Amino acid sequence: MSDSPTYFAFYGLPEAFLLDEAALKTKYYQLSRELHPDFHAQDTPAAQAEALRLSTLNTDAYRTLQDPDRRMAYLLGQHGLLEEGSAQNQLPGDFLMEVMELNEQLMELEFEPDSAATANLEAEVTALADTLDAGIQPVLAGYAQLPPDHRPAALAQVKTYYLKKRYLLRLRQQLATFAARS
């Protein structure tokens, strides 16, 4: 994909965590019409292949950028910050301890189901997620306006948020599975 522009450049958008989603959708539909195979049926095979490549890029770019979580992962990945299994993916110890405590509560509930305790655990996970979301919003909102030399620090904060959010998502999925069984 090295010869392709970034998804942001493809749409002529600034690299940002928060986008004008209406403008994104408009650009996607405009390119979808322009790149539709019917408009290129009389072109040379090379031109048809290029239109197909761009059409695929348009679809992939839109699917990624229109979803805030995918957009975040994509942007972090563009900066080489989401290498799987990387030692750089370490989360702060206090967060890991908090998640470990939540996991222990979840395991206890599996052995001794208790709807009130389950509701309390769900509320704790939601409160933790809400606190994380509230804390990262200013960073997400201000990223596009940051000077280039300030962006690495913001990206590091977003990466930590993203990794924490994935932990909490797994906890929520386990809770949902558990709740469905009880």
Image (cartoon, rainbow, N blue to C red):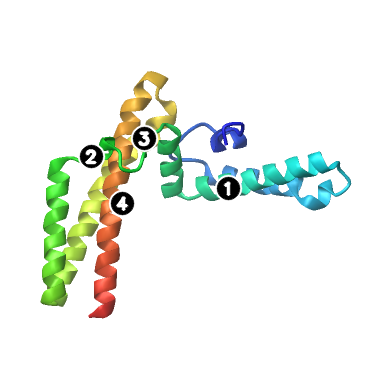
* Callout 1: SS: helix
The span from disc 3 to disc 1 (Cα, nearest Å) is 20 Å
Residue at image coords 69%, 43% = 53
Q: Position of residue 44 (x, y in %)?
A: 86, 41
Q: Do residues under tags 1 and 2 come within 8 Å of each other at their CB atoms? A: no
Could you say which is closer to the camera, residue 24 or residue 70?
70
Q: Earlier in the sequence, mark 3 or mark 4?
A: 3
Residue type marked 2: Gln
The image quadrant where one finds the C terminus is bottom left
What residue is pinned by disc 3? 81
The span from disc 2 to disc 3 (Cα, nearest Å) is 12 Å
Residue at image coords 14%, 77% = 113
Label drawn at residue 90: 2
Q: Earlier in the sequence, mark 1 or mark 2?
A: 1
Q: Position of residue 99 (x, y in %)?
A: 17, 53
| Vertical comparison of 116 with 137: above or below | below
Label drawn at residue 60: 1
User: Counting other residues with Cα less than 10 Å from the Cα at mark 4, is it few (<14), some (14-19), or many (20 or more)?
Assistant: few
Q: Seen in the image, is 45 located left or right of residue 177?
A: right
